[in-house]
């Protein structure tokens, strides 16, 4: 490492003072100083403009009329106070909305649990996700335990967004492992065929796949095989996810030294033991950062289902400002939805970065 | 297990046969079912519908269209629209991403903070949300009567207007192609091995390759101009609307802004990664040789970083081109939207989806091929590393 590591601490140079650090980092030369001052000014100006709009000149009164709100120079948070139920729950019946909220909490708990390293075994992860998803489904749909039945067509808002994401992962992840294994098969027809399929899916826009599953698949499938449109679209999203994730897992598998397979073979382990006990665990470890990245991307991409006519959070946001007196308040509604997405996506991607650092330390 | 199944070769052959059989059953079953459904609805399958006229109008197209044009012409226009939005969007995203990415490699903490906030903010919000947001912003601009003007630009809720040439659509298109040739041809002439003359003696040829197409472009514009009007048409308020000039529709500007900003955030990270991949020793060596920081940047670090980032950049470009399909959410007439409307109008679902797939495959493969060529052309050759 650096020379300082060899110094006796007492003899080492004292930490530079604040003024000196400032001079070193920000004011090394006149041009650096100019850039620093201008940049800082720009940064403060952006912060001030946003804060001024969102806080200082904003209307926080939940009962303000649209006219009062329009007159204010800042944000009008009244629209959120009055419409947050539409944005979060969509068309879900008013008195049952606690179920939708609880279902969202379930999903968040499930994601947090699967981020804990003590849950990182295939069985535990599968258990968490199966239990969590069934709990979510029962809560949302009802029909048993005295909960009134609420069909999928009335789900909406955040809960629908989360459901599509969770179901996509739950179907797509196992599928991606299967695809990756088939792609690495030693049988040429199978590996080439699956390779062609993966490349075809990857070269299409997700929207066209969602659209095809919503509109075209009904032509191709017999009546008894046609699930509802929501489930068809989820299958399309899962397929798309699986095609990308399969390539990530394949990359992870290629990173496992061939000696591992040979050692397993010489121990007399069969294919399934070799894959399940030796190759996949190591491949997953290699692929972990990219996998989390893929989850983040697919969470953001659930927002696309708005195009095939679902009332997820973005659509319900459009409805919240699109009707009646609040048409001017689009910024506030989009800021609210953007904040929700930002919290989910940013924390997941920060977590991914943290894992990457942690794994890099482990490898040294 | 019967004896013959223990033979590895037999088992492999059977497994592959099973795989092919399953694929065939799925594909043929789907096909048969689709035909039955179509017959039940009395619809003709096949590509005959391509010659029928569409009966609807496009709000945005580069080439002249009308509602009596056939479907195939709309598909061509759609692909052109997608490519047009894609290319301009990619250029904008690359510009933004390049600036932000380089900002983050300079070791000024303030610039670093600015770049990082930008990337973190825009990367973590779905693109379609940004598309909706910018569309709302653009359509909430003041009405044409109270339009704001910024220099040559006039901004109103009907669109953004800028000065334009008074030239017919086809002539403008041809002139555009000529200008593109004027940009690309000189590079080709300067590098190709098909010309016997050594590259040092080609200066005249390169100039000819630049000036020739440029002259052609000017000639086309002069021929195609409308003699009754001034050559440069400026947007002016007439009645309730703005007349003259080039109108950039709100849909196009919203898509362009979102793709530029969102793609820029991703490209910034790629650019930063590319510069990080250049060894510190390279900069130090350049410094030791007495190169100024600017020289070391343009001659050493940028070329090396470009090589490192090009493959990832190619992937990102392909992703961004595919992302232009989100234009359907706000009604931009791209290829995907035209296919979707075609399906709704004509019911030729499978054929239209096949065209969509073929179109995107062609675009992706072309892009990939172009980037492979560039990658090969700029890859370090063996002797370059040694000398």
Image: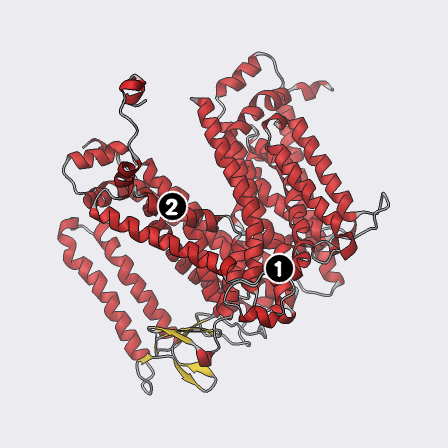
Chain designation of label 2: B
Q: Can you give x and y, in whole percent of width and height, for residue B202 in the image?
A: 16, 54
Q: In the figure, A86 relative to B106: above or below?
A: below
Using a 10 Å C-alpha cutoff, classify the residue at mark 1 as few (fewer than 14 neighbours), some (14 to 19) or many (20 or more).
many
Task: Say the numbered circle drawn on residue A80.
Answer: 1
Q: Is residue A221 left or right of residue B106?
A: right
Tell me, yes or no, whether the two marked residues, 2 and 1, touch with CB atoms within 8 Å.
Answer: no
Q: Position of residue A36 (x, y in %)?
A: 29, 48
Question: A256 or A98: nearer the eye?
Answer: A98
Q: Pick whichever, B372 or A234, lies toward us.
A: A234
Q: Which residue bears the numbered disc 2?
A: B113
The residue sitting at 64% across, 20% down in the picture is B7
Same chain for the residues under marks 2 and 1 in the image: no
- Residue at figure coordinates x 60%, y 50% from the top left: A302
The numbered mark at residue B98 is none
| Picture coordinates of residue B180, whole percent (x, y) | 31, 62
Q: Position of residue B278 (x, y in %)?
A: 30, 36
Eyeballing the image, is B352 above or below B289?
below
Residue sitting farthest toward the right: A146
Give me the C-alpha separation between circle 2 and circle 1: 31 Å
Q: Quadrant of the N terminus of chain A?
A: top left
In the rendered view of the protein, which quadrant contains the C terminus of chain A? top left
């Amino acid at each position: 490492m650096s020379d300082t590591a060899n110094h006796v601490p007492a003899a080492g140079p004292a930490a530079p003072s604040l003024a000196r650090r400032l001079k070193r980092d920000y004011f090394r030369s006149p041009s650096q100083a100019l850039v620093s001052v201008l940049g800082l000014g720009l940064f403060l100006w952006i912060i001030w403009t946003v804060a001024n709009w969102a806080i200082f000149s904003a209307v926080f009164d939940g009962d303000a009329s649209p006219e009062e709100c329009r007159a204010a120079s800042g944000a009008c948070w009244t629209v959120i106070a009055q419409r947050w139920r539409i944005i979060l729950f969509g068309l879900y019946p008013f008195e049952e909305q606690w179920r939708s909220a609880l279902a969202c909490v379930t999903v968040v708990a499930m994601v947090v649990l699967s981020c804990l390293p003590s849950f990182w075994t295939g069985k535990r992860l599968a258990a968490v996700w199966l239990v969590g998803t069934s709990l979510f489904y029962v809560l949302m749909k009802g029909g048993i335990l005295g909960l009134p039945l609420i069909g999928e067509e009335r789900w909406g808002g955040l809960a629908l967004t989360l459901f599509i994401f969770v179901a996509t992962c739950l179907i797509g992840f196992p599928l991606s492992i299967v695809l990756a294994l088939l792609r690495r098969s030693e049988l040429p027809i199978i590996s080439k065929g699956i390779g062609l399929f993966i490349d075809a899916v990857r070269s299409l826009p997700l929207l066209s796949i969602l659209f095809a599953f919503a509109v075209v698949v009904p032509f191709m499938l017999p009546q008894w095989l046609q699930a509802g449109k929501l489930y068809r679209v989820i299958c399309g999203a899962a397929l798309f996810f699986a095609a990308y994730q399969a390539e990530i897992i394949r990359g992870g598998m290629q990173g496992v030294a061939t000696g591992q397979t040979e050692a397993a073979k010489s121990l007399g382990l069969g294919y399934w033991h070799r894959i399940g006990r030796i190759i996949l665990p190591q491949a997953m470890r290699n692929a972990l950062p990219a996998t989390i990245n893929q989850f983040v991307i697919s969470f953001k991409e659930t927002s696309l289902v708005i195009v095939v006519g679902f009332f997820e959070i973005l659509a319900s946001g459009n409805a919240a400002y699109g009707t009646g007196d609040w048409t001017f308040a689009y910024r506030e509604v989009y800021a609210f939805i953007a904040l929700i997405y930002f919290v989910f996506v940013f924390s997941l991607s920060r977590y991914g970065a943290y894992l990457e650092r942690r794994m890099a330390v482990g490898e040294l | 297990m019967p004896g013959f199944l223990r033979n590895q070769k037999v088992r492999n052959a059977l497994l592959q046969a099973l795989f092919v059989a399953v694929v065939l059953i799925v594909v043929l079953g789907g096909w048969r079912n689709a035909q039955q459904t179509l017959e039940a609805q009395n619809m003709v399958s096949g590509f005959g519908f391509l010659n029928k006229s569409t009966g609807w109008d496009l709000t945005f197209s580069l080439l002249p269209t009308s509602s009596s044009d056939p479907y195939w012409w709309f598909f061509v226009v759609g692909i052109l629209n997608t490519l047009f939005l894609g290319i301009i969007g990619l250029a904008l995203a690359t510009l933004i991403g390049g600036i932000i990415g380089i900002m983050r490699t300079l070791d000024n903490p303030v610039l670093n903070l600015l770049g990082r906030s930008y990337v973190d903010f825009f990367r973590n919000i779905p693109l379609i949300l940004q598309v909706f947001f910018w569309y709302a912003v653009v359509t909430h601009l003041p009405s044409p009567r109270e339009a704001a003007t910024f220099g040559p630009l006039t901004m109103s809720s009907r669109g953004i207007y800028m000065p334009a040439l008074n030239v017919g659509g086809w002539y403008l298109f041809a002139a555009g192609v000529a200008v593109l040739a004027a940009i690309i041809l000189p590079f080709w002439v300067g590098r190709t091995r098909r010309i016997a003359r050594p590259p040092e003696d080609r200066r005249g040829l390169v100039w000819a390759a630049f000036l020739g197409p440029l002259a052609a472009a000017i000639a086309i514009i002069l021929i195609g101009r409308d003699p009754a009007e001034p050559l440069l048409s400026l947007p002016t308020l007439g009645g309730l609307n703005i007349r003259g000039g080039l109108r950039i529709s709100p849909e196009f500007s919203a898509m362009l802004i979102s793709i530029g900003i969102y793609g820029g955030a991703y490209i910034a990270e790629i650019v930063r990664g590319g510069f990080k991949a250049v060894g510190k020793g390279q900069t130090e060596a350049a410094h030791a040789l007495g190169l100024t920081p600017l020289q070391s940047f343009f001659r050493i670090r940028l070329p090396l970083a470009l090589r490192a980032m090009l493959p990832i950049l190619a992937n990102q470009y392909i992703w961004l081109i595919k992302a232009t399909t989100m234009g359907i959410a706000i009604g931009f007439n791209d290829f995907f939207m035209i296919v979707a409307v075609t399906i709704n109008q004509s019911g030729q679902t499978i054929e239209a989806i096949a065209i969509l797939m073929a179109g995107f495959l062609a675009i992706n493969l072309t892009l990939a091929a172009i980037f492979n060529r560039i990658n090969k052309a700029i890859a370090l050759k063996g002797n370059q590393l040694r000398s």
